Amino acid sequence: MSSKHLWPLLVFAACGAEAVPEPVEPNPDPPKIATFVADDGTGPRLSLEGTLDGKRLTLSLVARDAEPLFGFRAWVRFSDEATLVDVKTVPVLDDSSTALYLVVQEEGAVSLGGTRRRADVGDVAFDGPVAGLTFEANEDARFDVDGVIAKRADGSTVQLGTTGGTVMK
Amino acid sequence: MKRAIFLTVVSCFVASEARAQFDVRTQHVRVDLTGGDVVIDVDAEVHFDQSVSSIAMFRPFAPFTSLTIDGVAAERSAHPLAPEWLDRVTPPTPVGPGAATITYRIEGRPTCPAPSNPAAALCWYADGRVIFTPSGAASAWYLVDVFEGTFFTGSIAVVAPSDHMVLAGQDVPSRVEDHGDGTSTFHFDIDLPTSILGLYAGTLERVEGSGPFPVVAHRGPDAPIEGVTEAVERASEGVPALEAFLGTYPAAQANIVTVPRNFAFGGMGMHGTIYIADYIFGPYAFILRAGVLHELAHTYWGHQASGTGDDATAFFSEGFAEYSAWRAIGIAEGRAARRDGVRMNSVWYMYGRPEGVDAPVVGRNTGQSPAYVFVTYHKASSVLRTLEAAVGEAAFDRVLGSLQALGPGGLTIDAFVEAFAAEGYDATGDVTQWLYRTGFPRLEARTEGETLVIDVDGEWQLRVPLEIRRRDGTVEQRVVGLRAGPNAIALGAGVSHVAIDPDWTLVRALKSDGTDVTFDGVVDAADLLEVALHAGGAMPSERRRDGGYDPLYDLDGDGIIGNADLASVAAP
């Protein structure tokens, strides 16, 4: 017997006596997991990046492609589907001997930022996480960044765009 | 030009004889510097409005050896009005009305103790430098009327060693005549009517600027080279900036002459030549940035065009020169540099004065007031910035041009108001509140919801620029009119930062009702940032030294912007 005729037998043999399973259809309505979906952004900006664990949303306000600066202020605004649990600034402008940070909470918004203490200490690199925020968030919770003021030590303004995000399944 | 030296000294006895005695029409001056003594011959054509039996003349800085009126020798005696500085000159018979000729020779070594400080000099005649300043009490050499600056044309011829640099008149020499014996005569034309002349002759080191306009400094041994070089470079770059809004600089080159430490002034602007004291180039080099351009601007303000000798004359000279200096700095260095200069001037006027000392910019007694410098230089220049903002830069430049066209002795407050009227702007209210009155407006601002409320203390009518930044990043520029009392300004929604008069176009003290210095209704990191940007600012202890002080950010009002102010923002 040539091998040409042998291999279909092997196939059958491998299946043994079990029944050939029915083809599995894709589940038309799989269970969805909510996630934080960040808006797209390019250029120098302050972006919200986050992870959702259950209802616990951990957001980072992150400086991307930004120039060195002296100080900044930004507002993070959130919709009724979210409740702020905690907010902390990251000492991105240096420690407290050189820089000061301030967080102010309002209903549905939090202002955060910091500054170096005196212009003669100059600017500092402004890149990476600048604040961490924790929320209890439900689906459709919306987060935006606005009211950004960012300045160099000479008082001139650094232009920064912003991106937010939404909790969605 | 420090016309105040002339005016201040004279005005102490001018009250009883305020009229000009005669009008000097033309004047030819010959100065011989080749001997041990200086010899000066003056030949002046004058005009008397009425017959006079005697005239008052400044006693020259070297003795008269001859003096004639219409060719007849006149008698001299100490004048009872000011016997230290004035001679009464009496011809054998009354002269005038009509034309007359006054000639005189003075000969000797000049000595010019300043009337206000005898240890300080108004001329110099030693160590390779000959420096004469404009005729006045203790500094007279050419003929001027004691009581009023009249304007003449003519010439100056200076005989000096051929290797000397000679600066006189209003530009470089029109002709140099070499006598072949090591001496030359340097001829200067006085084409622009003037009452203000200076002279420098010497062999000081030449330091030339590298910028687009030719500037030469003549450096004395006590003037540090670093400072002189900085001054020359600033002038060389700065003259084109002055030309940008004042027109072509009316001299082929600008000269900076350093004058000895014991001179009675820090700087003096002649036509095309400025004198700056040696010491300014060292520890006071911070003055040079604006000081050099201020003095150069006097070629326009005080020479090309000037006041009539009335109460507004110093405003048209010093106020306009200071305004022009900072305008030029703004052109050369940018908006922030100009803003800081105007702020510095405003702050020095508002807070630098001794307690209770003030005077109107234009006032009968301003020249004798201890507030003279504060108001004439510092407040007045900021007031011109206010008017520039009110009428717009292009229209203001046309105002400047029309004032320049009025020439020597042509500037009056009426002409000033008319120049604005030609641009469709009624400046009478500004003249009244800013020039004829003392003081400055105090503003206190706060937010109430979406409304900015600015309280104005005192009867002022102000046009205040606002820069309104919103959360979405858009910026709105707005000008609001304010009157005495609370002024409510609807801002609309989404305000992120309101800057009130961010370019310091006004002499004003702005404070916040609290620590919200960004006037967005929230005290947050934006306020912290603004205070930190001004941290280190302090009330300056010296004129023209920028302490970076802005009262808005001095939240505890202690004269220093620092950690205590930052802490008050950060406090819960």
Image (cartoon, rainbow, N blue to C red):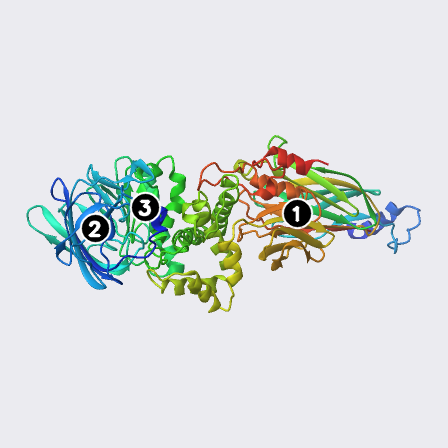
Q: Pinpoint residue B175: horizontal percent, then vertical percent.
A: 16, 57
What distance separates the C-alpha of mark 2 from that of mark 1?
82 Å
Crowd band around label 3 with a 10 angstrom C-alpha radius: few (<14), some (14–19), many (20+): many
Q: Pinpoint residue A153: horizontal percent, then vertical percent.
A: 54, 42
Q: Quadrant of residue A112?
A: top right
Tag 2 secondary structure: strand
* Left or right placement of residue A2 versus residue B566 in this view: right
Give, as a three-letter code, the residue at label 2. Answer: Val
The answer to whether mark 2 and mark 3 are in CB contact below 8 A is no
Whether labels 2 and 3 belong to a single chain: the reply is: yes
Q: Pinpoint residue A50: horizontal percent, then vertical percent.
A: 74, 44
Instruction: Please say whether residue B557 is visible from this viewpoint.
Output: yes
Crowd band around label 2 with a 10 angstrom C-alpha radius: few (<14), some (14–19), many (20+): many
Name the residue nearer the viewer: A157 or A56: A157
What distance separates the C-alpha of mark 2 from that of mark 3?
44 Å
Q: Pinpoint residue B11: horizontal percent, then vertical percent.
A: 36, 48
What distance separates the C-alpha of mark 3 from that of mark 1?
46 Å
For this orientation, the residue located farthest to the top is: A97
Instruction: Please say whether residue A2 is visible from this viewpoint.
Output: no
Q: From the image, tell me which residue sits under label 2.
A: B89
Q: Nearer the viewer, mark 2 or mark 1?
A: 2
Q: From the image, tell me which residue sits under label 1.
A: A46
Mark 2 chain = B
Q: Which label sits on residue B46?
A: none
Q: From the image, tell me which residue sits under label 3.
A: B232
Number of disc labels: 3
Mark before the other along the chain sequence, 2 or 3: 2
- Residue at (57%, 41%) from the top-left corner? B533
Q: Nearer the viewer, mark 3 or mark 1?
A: 3
Does B426 sit above or below residue B168?
A: below
